[in-house]
Image (cartoon, rainbow, N blue to C red):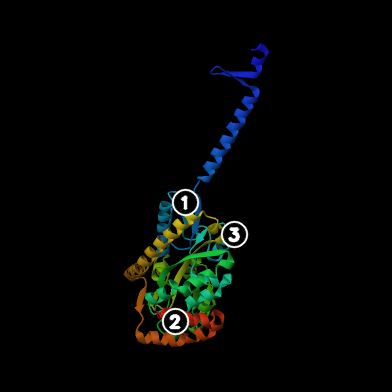
Amino acid sequence: MVPGRLSRSFYNNGTFLTSGDIVKIKLLAVALSAVLCVNAWAQAPIVIKFSHVVALDTPKGQAAERFKMLAEKATNGRVKVEVYPNSQLYKDKEELEALQLGAVQMLAPSLAKFGPLGVKEFEVFDLPYLFANKQALYHVTEGPVGKGLLQKLDAKGITGLAYWDNGFKVMSGNKALIKPADFRGQKMRIQASKVLDAQMRALGANPQVLAFSEVYQALQTGVVDGTENPPSNMYTQKMHEVQKFVTVSNHGYLGYAVIVNKKFWDGLPADIRTSLAKAMEEATTYEKAIAQRDNDLALEAIRKTGKTAVHMQTPQEQAEWRKALMPVYRDMEGRIGKDLLSAFIKASSGK
């Protein structure tokens, strides 16, 4: 060996390595490091931000937590679901835009929210006394009519995954709302729905659109006189503390659609998407099972506080409300679509 060559070589286990060999080893080390970094990135969990506007202990809040648990378990930790309740991230009017922009990946807005988005057909769910009972409702939401409505969201960059249930609504106010005439001149909070606007006007009330997170303060300060909600929403938001009367009218339905950003959903690995769909199916079954129970418990809790007088609507009183509200169907038929309304009525009857 020529002595001068030693300065350009490395001796290892009896073998001389040239400077070229050393360069190759360094390049290999860099490449290996890059592969390890890519693998580490690939193994990082997929984050789903799930935002909603109600309390944790509502049916929707509990179902969101159940989905989180099921999704993370089904994907062996490859997915992490972050749930943000009580408008922590976005209010009613903001959350759909946030979803479309990809700032959040999942929501469960009330069905009335899709009207202002441009899918006004969803406002059919707001029609008064549309569903005789939960079974009639499920004939629609679990059948082709309900699935067809969810597909209309695709054009808005949204994928509909499931319908969640929060039951039928009661009316509340600081005066007893027993007869349609009792609504005259009352400022009633509603969601941004043309159908709900028409409903309150048919009763003689003045509808006021407010975000859900603003309702308690609006009731407390007299900005509005009353509102409509399922009992679980009313109780968990403490609205009963600033409302003297409740009429259990079951006049309208409040449901939700669990939705995801379409681009995000379509971009998920197929096995992940399948696992999440299964987790959503199980969470939906759970949500439906607890919705009525929680509303019944909430109504009883409201009654027990003694702060709010609870009136159970009689069949005669309901007949008066139905008569007063019938014009809403005629006025909204053009907006919702005559064919869709007929399909809803037919499907709800189980035909």
Circle 2 Cα neighbour tier, 10 Å, few/some/many (<14 / 14–19 / ≥20):
some
The residue carrying mark 2 is 346
Q: What residue type is labelled 1?
A: Lys
**Height in image: 13 above or below 108?**
above
Work out how far the residue at label 3 is from the one at label 1, CA to CA, in angstroms: 20 Å
Percent from the top left, x then y, of residue 351? Answer: 41, 81
Residue plotted at (50% across, 51% down): 46
Residue 52's place in the image compared with 115, above or below, is above
Q: Is the residue 140 above or below the residue 46 in the image?
A: below
Q: Which numbered marker is on residue 299?
A: none
- Secondary element at tag 1: strand
Q: Where is residue 132 in the image (x, y as percent from the top left)?
A: 39, 80
Percent from the top left, x then y, of residue 35? 56, 39
Read off the residue under disc 1: 80
> Earlier along the polypeptide chain: callout 3 or callout 2?
3
Quadrant for the N terminus, please.
Answer: top right
Is residue 90 rendered to the left or right of residue 18? Answer: left
Q: How crowded is mark 1: few (under 14 residues within 10 Å), some or many (20 or more)?
A: some
Disc 3 is placed on an element classified as helix
The residue to which callout 3 is attached is 101
- Mark nearest the camera among 1 and 2 is 2
Number of labels in the image equals 3
Q: Earlier in the sequence, mark 3 or mark 1?
A: 1
| Left or right: 135 as drawn, with respect to 22 | left
Amino acid tagged 2: Lys
Give the Cα separation between the discs numbered 1 and 2: 41 Å
Estimate the x, y position of residue 84 in percent, counting from the top left.
48, 57
Q: Which residue is drawn at 44% across and 73% down?
A: 143
The residue located at (56%, 42%) in the rendering is: 38
Do we see residue 284 in this rendering?
Answer: yes
Upstream in the sequence, badge 1 or badge 2? 1
